[in-house]
Amino acid sequence: MGFDKTRLRVLDDRDLEGALVRALEVALVAVREALFAHAEGRLLAPPRFALEAERGRLVFTAGAETRSSQALGFRVYETYPERTPDHAQLVAVWDARDGRLLGLVVGDRLGALRTAALNAVALERLAPPDARVLGVLGTGFQARHHTLAALLVRPFEQVRVYSRSPENRAAFVRWLASHTQTPVEATSSAEATVRAADVLLEVTSARTPVFDPAWLKPGAHVNTVGPKLRNAHALPLEAALAAGLLVSDSPAQLEAYGDHFLPPEARRRVVPLSALVAKQHPGRRRADERTVFLSAGLAGTEPVVARRLLDAFGGGVDG
């Protein structure tokens, strides 16, 4: 008897967007599971790889978590210039114990949830204990998810946000105000946001530094999501080199870039986020120590998040 497609659950962005806070809470649980597994050597997380075509690429990340979720799978997305609803990411997840296909998640939402959750866990572990102001550089799709996830793990008193477009800043403020009670204010400059921030989220696609490291407070923590290549990086190199602690969800992925913006001696200082989660590393050592999280995208986390979302939202085959 062949595969019965009626038993296969498919989630898409519409299934998740109406319950975004719940979806982020599920993603946070899932990435914590994956990070503990990574610390114990039970998360298979090879660097991403790509299939080149004439006008774009298919980029794959694959992995398996055998500690708790027993999720095995891959994520694939394309890099074609067109951006229509037909362009969508796909995550497929199997049961790592017996190889049963459990379900599919289609769309951009899962990738945003997973990345925001990883960054929120980093912030949770690295932010100053008395952090009150969350600064955000960027107002796009990813920035919204990252800000909301940060507010789920730390009780910030205020959010201050900046991007170059006043219209986008205003839209971000309206959107966040509809999802949280935390006061949010749009600023008129990156400097105003950075100088006020105890924790700074850089969530842009900028290929040149988006702030002056001299604006950072002593003890500030920075999450950087933007490009990290030698000739294209949103984080000022000086901010990374001056940090007392550099952390990444995937140091292996940083090394796989080849032309990473950090020099070799700085890359050797990068601590895996999983080591902090599993308390194999003490994390922040002083109140005035600046810390930086270099978001790279830990492979193997997508199947874990997908499986937990399928479970939480009524998806997946039985078992």
Image (spheres, rainbow, N blue to C red):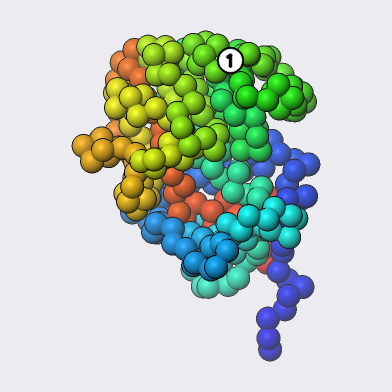
182 lies left or right of 243: right
Residue at the (43%, 36%) spot, across then down: 233
Where 199 sits versus 235, above or below?
Answer: above
Residue at the (34%, 44%) spot, across then down: 260
140 lies left or right of 32: right
* Quadrant location of the N terminus in the rendered image: bottom right
User: How many badges with numbers are in the image?
Assistant: 1
Quarter assignment of residue 238: top left
Give percent across and percent down for residue 49. Answer: 44, 62
> SS at mark 1?
loop
The answer to whether residue 11 is seen in the rendering is: no
100 lies left or right of 38: right
Quarter assignment of residue 217: top left
Where 14 sits versus 159, above or below?
Answer: below
Closer to the camera in the image, 72 or 90:
90
Give percent across and percent down for residue 73. Answer: 52, 64
* Quadrant location of the C terminus in the rendered image: bottom right
Residue at the limit of the structure toward the bottom, as seen here: 1
31 lies left or right of 144: left
Residue at the (63%, 14%) spot, across then down: 187
Residue at the (44%, 58%) spot, across then down: 48
Give percent across and percent down for residue 306. Answer: 60, 55
Residue type at tag 1: Ser
Which residue corresponds to mark 1?
189
The answer to whether residue 99 is seen in the rendering is: yes
Quarter assignment of residue 178: top right
Give percent across and percent down for residue 224. Answer: 46, 32
**Label 1 environment density (alpha carbons within 10 Å; few <14, some 14–19, many ≥20):** some
Closer to the camera in the image, 302 or 216:
216
